Image: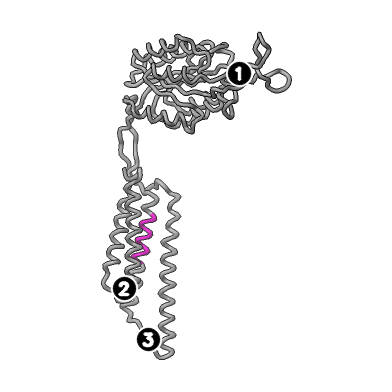
Amino acid sequence: MDFGSPALLIFLVAAALALAAGLWTLRWRARQVERMLRHGGGDLAPPSQVRSRLLALGVVALALLLLALAAARPQVGSHDTEVRQTGIAVAIVLDVSLSMAAQDVQPSRFALAQQEVAGLLDRLQGNRVGLVLFGGDAFVRFPLTRDIDVAREIIAALEPGESFVGRGTNIDAAIEAGQSLLEDSSAATRAILVISDGESFGGQSLLAASAAAADGLRIFSAGAGTPEGATIPVEQRSGGPTPQLDAETGLPIISRADFPALIALAEAGRGRFVRLAEPDALAALSVDFDSLESSTFAVEIESVPRERFQIFAGIALLLLVLELLWPARRRFWPRTSGRAIALVSLILVTGIVVTACASGAYS
């Protein structure tokens, strides 16, 4: 026999403590009776009543022992079950242009985007996710995958201003790359999530979004930065980062987020826009994804242990009920004490049953 939660076997100590406390109480009562007899008062408890008390104590201790075992989820045998992996196909289209290094949001536009994407990936377990990087051009960084952990590691290692995408912001190419990434997917719902500051989006971006929507895709967008903008830090060989300068004026370039362009992009793609500066912005989009039609990607047969905690919990419940109904108990426990014990037992048993029925183990 194995246990699904072996750490909870520590609750066996509670049964031992309950038994020890009960024995100490019975011994204390016996001494009180002896003291009363020495002073000429009190009646000696008959042996049958002492045995009843010890037997009742043993029943409660055994019930606690069984409840502790039930909490540890004993497992005997196993059975095969069919596990269906369902979800949607999502292409994350991430802007890695140099403007994403601006720090008008903390720690920076790109770092905030990485944090939000990591949170989103946690909520996309079971779905298929691909990644497109874009700047002056676009390319697929990795195709659709269900390996969310690897996807998270790749995204965490990226930096803004990657040299392999060139300068600029070519959103048209990015949407087309996302569309090509999703075209071979059999998912009923295919979505593109564009994460960018929206700066320098060309007029062809809405045409690209409309074409993708006509092909059955949904386009969502997330805006990084602020309309007020900030300078773009550029690393120098000597010294720290300095603001990028305009070649014509020699003044620092101010990069401003273009939220209207991103909103228009989402509207053309039948999706929704969110601002990354809002708490859990991309997590909110996961709710939209969950509401979309999902597809079955794979069907696997898994061997699942058979949970047997119900047997132990059921026997414990039966013992507690029998103890409460025990006629002999009423002769040596006051009515008030009996009601208190009944109430505590009822709360304990109800808690165990409700917890078991609400757990994954019960399902």
What's the amino acid at mark 1?
Ile
For the residues labelled 2 and 3, the Cα–Cα distance comes to 20 Å
N-term mark: 2 or 1 = 1
Helix, strand or loop for disc 1: strand
Q: Is residue 135 magenta?
A: no
Pointer 1 local density, CA inside 10 Å: few below 14, some 14–19, many at least 20: some
The chief SS type of the magenta part is helix
Q: Tell whether 90 sits left or right of 84.
A: right
Establish if 116 lies above or below 14: above
Q: Which residue is mark 1?
A: 254
Q: Nearer the viewer, mark 2 or mark 3?
A: 2
The span shown in magenta is: 58-68
Q: Are marks 2 and 3 in contact (CB under 8 Å)?
A: no
Quarter of the rendering occupied by the C terminus: top left
Q: Position of residue 321 (x, y in %)?
A: 28, 63
Helix, strand or loop for disc 3: loop
